[in-house]
Image (cartoon, grey):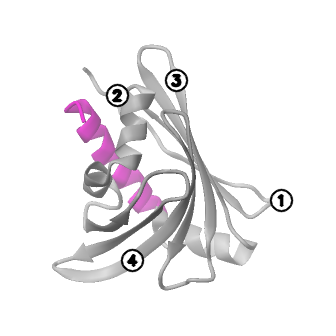
């Protein structure tokens, strides 16, 4: 399979405190979905190249919970946790996403896996946060680097048949 370099769109709506991510992958929806619910796969691609991820809790089902930590040079630098509100195989995930350093800043995220021609997938993630200040803080945190580099790592895994 040949992989095309895909751009990641990061959009902020000026009317509501949301962040939308849109990215295409040269893999079927089942593969992209699996990379989001299989804890071993998820840990291999989430986040920037400079960190490693340790999954500490993972129950990828409607009503389940998750948590992971990011390490850099052997030191824990960030932890995240949330709940799976809906897991609809190969179609949709709705979960909460919380950075432990800001436990009041819970995001509600909806991920949709859209099948495209040629065995490809368009992933859309809509993140809703409490207010514009929180949204703007997320956008200015460097999250764009983590998202883009993470999706590059995911491309590599998908190319290898993950």
Mark 1 vs mark 4: give the one in front: 4
Which region of the structure is painted magenta? 144-162
- Secondary structure beneath label 1: loop
Quadrant in which the N terminus is drawn? top left
Within the magenta stretch, is there residue 160? yes
As measured in the structure, the alpha-carbon distance from the residue carrying label 2 to the one carrying label 4 is 32 Å
Which residue sits at x=34%, y=54%? 149
As measured in the structure, the alpha-carbon distance from the residue carrying label 4 to the one carrying label 3 is 32 Å
Q: Is residue 121 above or below residue 32?
A: above
Q: Are marks 2 and 4 in contact (CB under 8 Å)?
A: no
Q: In this view, does 83 lie above or below 105?
A: above
Numbered tag placed on residue 79 in the rendering: 4
Q: Residues within 10 Å of mark 4 (few under 14, many from 20)?
A: some
Q: Are marks 3 and 1 in contact (CB under 8 Å)?
A: no
Q: Name the residue under label 2.
A: 4
Q: How crowded is mark 1: few (under 14 residues within 10 Å), some or many (20 or more)?
A: few
As measured in the structure, the alpha-carbon distance from the residue carrying label 2 to the one carrying label 3 is 16 Å
Q: Name the residue under label 1.
A: 15
Q: Mark 3 points at which residue?
A: 115
């Amino acid at each position: 399979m040949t992989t095309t370099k895909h751009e990641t769109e990061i959009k902020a709506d000026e009317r509501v405190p949301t962040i939308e991510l849109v990215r295409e992958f040269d893999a079927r929806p089942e593969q992209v979905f699996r990379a989001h619910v299989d804890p071993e796969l998820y840990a291999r691609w989430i986040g920037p190249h400079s960190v490693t991820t340790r999954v500490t809790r993972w129950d990828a089902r409607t009503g389940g919970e998750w948590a992971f930590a990011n390490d850099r040079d052997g030191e824990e630098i960030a932890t995240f946790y949330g709940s799976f509100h809906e897991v609809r195989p190969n179609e949709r995930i709705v979960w909460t996403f919380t950075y432990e350093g800001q436990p009041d800043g819970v995001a509600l995220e909806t991920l949709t896996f859209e099948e495209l021609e040629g065995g490809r997938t368009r992933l859309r993630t809509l993140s809703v946060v409490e207010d514009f200040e929180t949204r703007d803080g997320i956008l200015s945190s460097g999250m764009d680097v983590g998202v883009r580099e993470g999706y590059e790592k995911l491309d590599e895994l998908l190319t290898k048949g993950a």
